[in-house]
Image: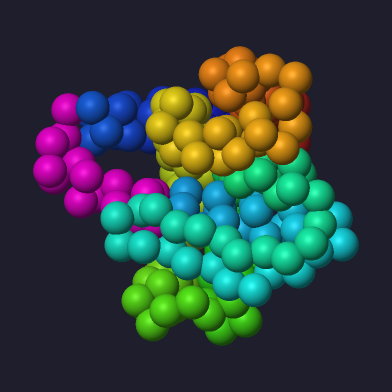
């Protein structure tokens, strides 16, 4: 294992916790890109769920306050709904994993993420504000990837912060999705589904950590 990896990860967790819970308005400002990224990954998860189940995406909106929505047609409503929360958890873990294990792929991953943001803003246009936010974020990721040496640390932090944000926000962020999921899927109340989703997201993160720290190959 890279001897510098654990201290870097612990430092990132510490920075996130301090900013999130003790940073006040300054912490909110610094973590604003994370809020925007979580919103985008959440809506991208809905869109992906629609496409994978034979539906289509007609619009994707990201708001300055971190909220958003995705307009879909057809597809599996259950998969589309759960795709927001668990899809963003999966993508956050994937970003974190690539950032930790694959130094040489970090730049490409940031560029792919920037491309997806710009593409979503064009193909699924809902408003100039949403598309402008996506383009701005995409430009920032492009700059980090091409003009700095921070690509690996940036990808690690964004992925880690995304996962921590999602787990911490389990009873707020997906609330409307959970209410609809209860109506579509049934079986349990939305509160039970809330903890099922949380357990799945948390288990994925723990598995990812075990895999990362249990292997010694880094490149």
Which percent across, then down, holds residue 160? 49, 38
Specify the principal SS of the magenta part: helix
> Which residues, given as a range, are shown in magenta?
22-37
Which percent across, then down, holds residue 216? 73, 29
Camera-side residue: 104 or 24? 24
Q: Residue at x 24, y 50 (%)?
A: 30
The single residue placed furthest to the right in the displayed view is 54
Which percent across, then down, holds residue 46? 65, 53
Q: Residue at x 55, y 68 (%)?
A: 60
Evaluate whether residue 97 shows in this view.
no
Camera-side residue: 213 or 15? 15
Q: Residue at x 58, y 24 (%)?
A: 190
| Side of 17 relative to 81 (left or right) | left
The single residue placed furthest to the front in the displayed view is 183
Using the rendered view, name the quadrant where residue 81 is placed. top right
Residue 69 vertical placement versus 161 (above, below): below
Evaluate whether residue 42 shows in this view.
yes
Camera-side residue: 129 or 107? 129
Asked if residue 35 is among those painted magenta in the image, a careful observer would answer yes
């Amino acid at each position: 294992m890279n001897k510098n990896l654990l201290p870097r990860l612990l430092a990132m967790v510490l920075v996130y916790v301090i900013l999130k819970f003790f940073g006040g308005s300054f912490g909110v400002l610094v973590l604003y890109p994370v809020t925007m990224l979580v919103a985008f990954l959440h809506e991208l998860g809905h869109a992906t769920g629609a496409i994978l189940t034979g539906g289509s995406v007609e619009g994707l909106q990201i708001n300055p306050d971190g909220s958003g929505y995705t307009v879909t047609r057809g597809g599996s409503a259950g998969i589309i709904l759960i795709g927001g929360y668990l899809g963003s958890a999966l993508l956050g873990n994937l970003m974190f994993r690539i950032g930790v294990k694959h130094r040489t792929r970090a730049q490409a991953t940031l560029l792919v993420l920037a491309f997806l943001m710009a593409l979503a803003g064009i193909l699924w246009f809902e408003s100039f504000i949403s598309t402008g936010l996506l383009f701005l974020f995409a430009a920032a990721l492009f700059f980090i990837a091409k003009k700095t040496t921070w690509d690996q640390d940036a990808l690690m932090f964004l992925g880690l912060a995304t996962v921590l944000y999602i787990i911490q926000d389990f009873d707020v962020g997906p609330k409307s999705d959970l209410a609809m999921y209860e109506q579509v899927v049934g079986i349990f109340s939305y509160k039970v589904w809330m903890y099922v989703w949380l357990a799945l997201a948390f288990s994925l993160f723990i598995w990812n950590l075990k895999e990362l720290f249990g292997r010694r190959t880094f490149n």
